[in-house]
Each structure stands twice: as C-alpha cells, then as structure tokens.
Image (tube, helix red, strand yellow):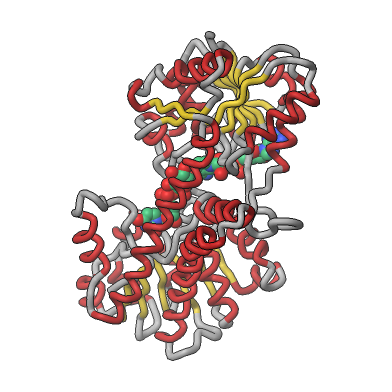
Amino acid sequence: MNIKNICCIGAGYVGGPTMAVIAQKCPEINVTVVDINEERIKAWNDENVENIPIYEPGLPEVVKEARGRNLFFSTDVDAAIDKADMIFISVNTPTKTYGIGKGMAADLKFIELCARQIARVAKDDKIVVEKSTLPVRTAEALKNILDNTGNGVNYQILSNPEFLAEGTAVDDLMNPDRVLIGGDIDTAKGKEAVDALVDVYAHWVPRERLLTTNVWSSELSKLTANAFLAQRVSSINAMSELCEKTGADVNEVSKAVGMDSRIGAKFLKSSVGFGGSCFQKDILNLVYISKSFGLHEVADYLEQVIIMNDHQKRRFAAKIVQTLFNTVSGKKIALLGWAFKKDTNDTRESAAIYVADYLLNEQAEIVVYDPKVKTEQIYADLDYLNTRSSEENRARVTVVDGAYEATKDAHAVAVLTEWDEFKELDWQKIYKEMLKPAFLFDGRRLLERKTKEDIGFEFYAIGS
Ligand code: NAD
Ligand code: UDX
C-alpha cells in the first residue's frame, strides 16, 4: 500500500516537527498538518520561517524546504481528513483536571473528539495512527468509536509513539534510536497498515531501527520509556541531596556511576527538577493505570519519582530563603531561565514556575530573563497555579529582555535553565552590580564554582 496523503491532527511540539521531517524526507507524500488553533496555524504559515510557533534548533530550515511543496498547515480539519490515506493524531493528552482520575489520569477528550470527527468525515478506508502518548489499550476505544459511528469504512489503528525530546527534536527525528510501530500484526489488513507506515519511515531510518510490535506493547513502551528516564533524574537528584550533606559531588558521582556500561551516562545530570509536558503526566498516568488494576505497590513505586522531583524543586527554593538569612521578603531575586530545558520555548511543568511561586509566597520580588520565552507565557504559567491574583503576579514579577537587567541590584541570582548563553555572561559585571553579599544559586550545575567564588559570589550549586 502506497501512502500519498498524510494528515496530522495537532500542530504542536510533536505534530509540527514530526510532519515537517516526514515531508522533507518523503517529497512524494503530501503532508497536511491541521489544528483548531488558528493563531498557531497562522504562525506555522508565517512568511518569515523564524516566526513558526515552536522554537527548535534546525526546524526553520526543514520547514522552509518542504512548506508549500508537500507540507501544508491548515485549519480545515475536515478537508485534510477526507483527502488522507493515513491520519496521525497528535493532539495533547494532559492530566485530567476534573472528575474521576483528576490529577492523575490522562484526559482523552481531545483524542475522542478527533476519532468522532474522523468517523463523521471519512468516506474511504483510513489508517489512523496514534502519535500522542496514550494509556495502554486506548486503541481499543478509538476503534470502538470509529467502527460504531463511522460510515462503514474500514479503519486500521496503529500506535506510533514519538520519542523526540524538545530542544533536540530535529536531530532526534532525523536519526532516531528506534521508531516503534504497533499494529494488528496478526491480520493481513493490520500487517499491510504496519508495512505502509514502515515504508514511510524507511525513506530515512535504517530498517533495523524500525521496531514493530503489537499495539498494547507499543502504547505501554512509550509510558515505560518516559518513566525510566524520569526515574534516573529523580535517582541522581536524590543523591544530590546526600552529596550536599556528605562532601561528595554529584557530578563526580554521576560520572563514576555512568561509566559503568550497564548503567550508562545519559540522564544522570542533577538539576532543580525535571519539567516538560511529558514526564510527570506520563508517570501519573502509569500510576493511575496501575491503581486501576489494583497494583498498588507498582503505583507507589512509580509515584516516588514525582514525590522526589517535587521535593527537589521545593528544596532548591527553600535553600535560597535559608541562605538569604531566612527571609526574601521585599528582596529582588533574579531568575535566569524559565523554559523547562535549554533550546526550547516550552515552559510546561518547568521547575522555574514552582521555584518562583515558592519565592513569591515568601514575599520576594522576582525578575525573570529567558532568551526564548514570551512575557505573557510567564504570567500565564503563574496564573495557572492560582496561588494569587493575576494582578499580584504582574505587580511582583518583572520580565526583562536581558540577563544584566535582571541581575542588576538583585540580592540573589538563580540559574534555572541551562541556556548556553548564561555560561558566557560577564559574571564580574553581574557581581559588581548586585547587592552584597551577592548570592548565586546554580540549579543546573552550569557554572564553574571556582571562578565565581574568586569573583566574590556566595555560590551554591545543586549536589555539591
Ligand atoms: P501541544 O499542546 O503542543 O499540541 C497539541 C495540539 O493539538 C494543539 O495545538 C491543539 O490545539 C491541537 N488540538 C487539540 N484538539 C484538537 C482537535 N480536536 N482538532 C485539531 N487540533 C486539536 O502538544 P504536544 O507537546 O505536541 O504533544 C502532543 C502529544 O504528543 C501528547 O500526547 C504528548 O504526550 C505527546 N508527546 C509529546 C512530546 C513533547 O516533547 N512535547 C514528546 C513525545 C510525545
Ligand atoms: C522527554 C523524553 O526525553 C522524550 O523521549 C519524550 O518523547 C518526551 O519527554 P523532553 O521532556 O522534551 O523529552 O526533554 P528531556 O530531555 O527528556 O528533559 C526532561 C526534563 O528532565 C528537563 O527538565 C530536563 O532539564 C530534565 N533532565 C534531563 C535533568 O534534569 N537531568 C537529565 O540528566 C536529563
């Protein structure tokens, strides 16, 4: 089966980059990315490719090459569904904020809406691909909706979870460790659908990295991968606290441990806590699924990863308060970085939000500088917590355009995102313009201790 037209519902951090790369690598396939968010689609179509809505290194070049040739962004969801042989669903699946499973289960309402829309519009057979991260056995529910509300057309449901990380999305997509495709491999139709998707990826991914499994294994593998990665970060962060008490250095411990080939070096970097739209959401989802099967020990085990992460964020903020003579009331604290990691403008679940909220509760005055995050986003993140009125957030938090503006006259500076440019700052100048003693808190192990202490900073870094 030859795929000629692909539609992707959801033009977000996954849908946009993933489809841009498919379009670039498969010039004979038409790829249309659709979204109900008009502003987002408008930005994807912006003449100046630097204005696309997602900041991701290398992405503008890919979009520039394919857009208008075989890559299209549109709000006409029905038309794109109608035309497509293969439909990717790449909509958001956030943690539920209401009802049963509130605060834990994945909210599948956007997924269900997509399924109902496909069922309403489709007039010929379609392959529907789950690109969103979904609870194990979601494909069953999708199939049920499609088969019972559709126009009698045949659907094959595939699971093709995305493993890209933000900030390195283009590299990850161009050169993936593996591409996972789950399908109904025991039936001829199912096998045909799996092969069709394999052929798309085989345009640029070596065949041995294209892994096919049954649907349930594929759905569960995605959640498992995120749980394992997050667990490593929480493990090293647990050690960071012990390092601080014992004189060990978490970077040295992490290097020593990571050189064991059975453990490996990646994802052992201690930090102020992991953020991002995936880790917490996906672990909570696993906790919820485990509990719903009565697997309480499994649920408790996984939940500790989140408990540790919350502790790490709180502990870092508390350290700032304690070090500043137990009060930050009325003191100016400069936060360098708001994104949940470098090289992205995404702030979802960023540790910075929680550190800022903690310090605001302690009556600090916060000044934020991030190279890529927009001012309105920072206020929206704080407002979302609902800790105080949005007027108060605006009165007590200032967002500025540069690091020196942020740090001038500050009592303390905290590095919360590991942006490369923070390493290159003129720290001598920053020291000179701060109040004394000048406190510097490194939540990312980004800065070198010796040079900062030589300048005169009172320096604290996670895990040493
Ligand atoms: P996102 O919020 O950036 O994008 C989702 C988009 O879907 C939004 O623009 C929204 O308007 C659109 N949408 C929602 N319902 C729609 C509908 N009915 N019709 C048309 N458009 C609709 O989310 P994201 O970060 O791209 O994540 C999408 C999925 O991929 C999630 O399940 C997530 O867990 C998973 N995932 C994310 C990442 C990541 O790094 N962000 C990585 C791997 C997997
Ligand atoms: C993650 C997974 O890596 C990716 O495979 C999946 O598809 C989506 O979720 P992402 O959240 O975009 O990707 O970024 P990631 O690099 O995993 O970082 C997540 C968080 O963990 C960030 O806040 C990062 O700073 C933090 N982190 C990561 C650490 O604190 N230490 C590390 O060693 C690695």
Going 54% across and 58% down the picture, which residue do you hit?
349
Residue toward you, 84 or 296? 296
Residue toward you, 31 or 40? 31
Going 66% across and 33% down the picture, which residue do you hit?
140
- Left or right: where 152 falls relative to 201: right
Going 53% across and 70% down the picture, which residue do you hit?
356
Asked if residue 3 shows in the view, the reply is: yes
Task: State the image quarter where residue 216 is shown.
Answer: top right
The location of residue 118, given as percent across then percent down, is 73, 25
Going 48% across and 51% down the picture, which residue do you hit?
372
Residue toward you, 125 or 443? 125
Asked if residue 37 shows in the view, the reply is: no
Residue 389 drawn above or below residue 323: above
Task: State the image quarter where residue 315 is shown.
Answer: bottom left
Residue 322 drawn above or below residue 13: below
The location of residue 313, given as percent across then percent down, is 47, 70
Residue 337 drawn above or below residue 176: below
Number of callouts in the render?
A: 0
Task: State the image quarter where residue 85 is shown.
Answer: top right
Residue toward you, 142 or 420? 142
Q: Residue lying furthest bottom in this view?
A: 325
The location of residue 339, given as percent across then percent down, is 48, 55
Picture quarter with the C terminus: bottom left
Residue 346 drawn above or below residue 185: below
- Left or right: where 139 falls relative to 178: right
The location of residue 251, given as percent across then percent down, is 25, 64
